[in-house]
Amino acid sequence: MTKGIIASPGIRIGKAYLFQTGKIIIPKYTISENDVASEISRFELAIEQTKNEIKGIQEQIAGNLSKDTADIFTSHLMVLEDPQIEEKVRKEIIEKKKNAEWTINDISLELINSLASIEDDYLRERIIDISDINKRLVANLQKTASPSLQSITEEVIVFASDLTPSETALMNKEHILAFVTDKGARTSHTAIMARALEIPAIVGTINITSLVKNDDLVIVDAVHGQIIIDPSPEQIDEFRRYQEDFRELELELAKLTNLPAKTFDSEEIFIYGNIDVPEEMKIIKDHGAQGIGLFRSEFLFLDKSLPDEEKQFLEYKRVADFFDPAPVTIRTIDVGADKVYAYTNTYRERNPSLGCRAIRFSLENEALFKIQIRAILRASHYGNVKLMFPMITTIEEFKKARRIAEESMDELRREKIPFDEKINIGLMIEVPSAVINADILAKYADFFSVGTNDLVQYLLAVDRISEKIAYLYNPLNLSVLRFLRQIADVARKHSMPLSICGEMAGEPHYTMVLLGLGFRHLSMAPIYMHQVKKLVRSVSIAECVEMVDSLLKLEDTEDIENMVRKKFKEKFYDLP
């Protein structure tokens, strides 16, 4: 059995198909002065051909799914139309007399290496987008056709080292039952496409392609994130029953989409979506989200050139308008200098998690910060927008950030540009100091949102992506539960709106714990929205509080986990 990351849920049984695109052979040779013009012309033709291919994929996706999903490929077109990249290619061809394939590949590798060192999953996953563009450009320069999943004519489960968004987009749902990759993360454009196509997928298995062979019978359990190769007859029977049960459960849970998330004792719980890119809007809304609890803005800062105010405004407005009158909470950029200037800046943090990132980076770069705040404020005129600052560690940081927001409001008033005069400005609680000073921060903020991913990491002093100490990263650690109770108590005392938007919010096993701790606003990925709503509608706040009181009397994390697991199985035996 091999484990991986669930990108799109479901269970499938079928024959393995190893999809191998082969290594790209990059011809490297120098050209004469007389050939420079024709080489540049060859490059320009390849750019146009690649853009037309991408636009064709966009049109196909827009027709089969939605325009929002098709917009995933807008970032591809932006790279292809980036004047700085085009100019760099021309300059290298003219000055170094390198052929177009060699030049394009070197520039692509430069971008990929810059992104590879980034800790943030979403930003790092843009590597596959760059690889997708590079592969298409080189193929068009060489006038060769790449292997395609469109040609598959029988039911198979695809296994690949990685899949590009365009390869995923062109999959035929009738024949491709599921796919599994060595690389990838849940935030990749490939994963987003899988969810839009409703094709079960597991990514990030590390080495699955070295373990499976063509025509092997495999079970893909994209509910628990596992792959079984050459299953026994008993396992096949078990998973066929499980597959049918899961389908029935999905249909049953889907009926909850438009029903209120109310507990047995009539306490209303609000379920919001976390969004990485606007293309996820429709998926999130279709799962019954009551708005966006976390709109990550980092996707806008991937280009070599920084996004101007207008570009940011249009993207924020698009999401705000789509969900209006439901709330959309936009978080200002949560990265560091090494990420924003990844393509041109050699600056590197020795310890990025504790360095100049998030609000620290924004306050260090006030001009950039103001552009983003102005864009968010302008978007607030078109929907119920909230402005949120990440990784606030000191009271002074929030005061300064809020002052800059108020200065931006004054500028917009003088320019007679409309915005929501009553826009709520809040912060993410994701470091211990913010929890400890929450009572003071409550005097200056309009709302709190708890980011459990970083909070657990900083509280337990554990790198959650380190294999050696990953076991220490546990949201059910007693210190984490105590901190969550503390922040909920402060919020209640100060009548402060409070939400939680880390991975913990979207984990069904933790729903009763969060309700018992005092959380009523949960923001998550769409994959678990229906399950969480079912849990909410099946419990009372009183029993959740009783369970949490018992948990807080325990000392060992294992005992806490066992109690939570036992209660979950007692109440929700039909959920995975």
Image: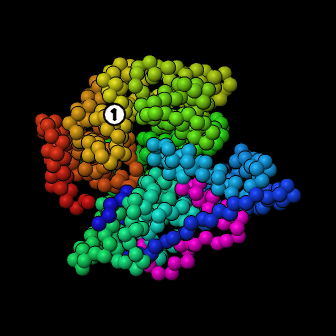
Q: In the rendered image, which residue does mark 1 sit on? A: 458
Residue 358 seen by the camera: no
Within the image, what quadrant is residue 231 found in?
Answer: bottom left
Q: Residue type at mark 1: give it.
A: Tyr
**Residue 131 covered by magenta stretch:** yes
Residue 475 seen by the camera: yes
x 42%, y 77%: residue: 214
Mark 1 closeness class: few <14, some 14–19, many ≥20 residues within 10 Å: some
Q: Nearer the viewer, residue 63 or 39?
A: 39
x 44%, y 69%: residue: 159
x 38%, y 19%: residue: 443
Judge from the rendering whether residue 105 lies leftward or rightward of residue 503; answer left or right.
right
Name the element at disc 1. Answer: helix
Judge from the rendering whether residue 226 lies leftward or rightward of residue 42; answer left or right.
left
Within the image, what quadrant is residue 68 found in?
Answer: bottom right
Q: Is residue 323 above or below residue 37?
A: above
* Residue sitting farthest toward the right: 34
Tally of marks: 1
Query: What percent of the width, then of the height, locates residue 346?
Result: 58, 36
Q: Is residue 271 above or below residue 576?
A: above
Query: What percent of the width, then of the height, locates residue 330?
Result: 49, 37
Q: How is the image coloured?
A: rainbow
**Residue 273 covered by magenta stretch:** no
Query: Quadrant of the image for the C terminus?
Result: bottom left
Judge from the rendering whether residue 206 lies leftward or rightward of residue 363; answer left or right.
left
Q: Is residue 272 above or below residue 208?
A: above
**Which residues, given as a range, are shown in magenta?**
128-157
x 64%, y 56%: residue: 105
Query: What percent of the width, then of the height, locates residue 202?
Result: 39, 62
Per the picture, the main secondary structure of the magenta-coloured stretch is helix
Q: Nearer the viewer, residue 293 or 290?
A: 293
Judge from the rendering whether residue 403 lies leftward or rightward of residue 469; answer left or right.
right
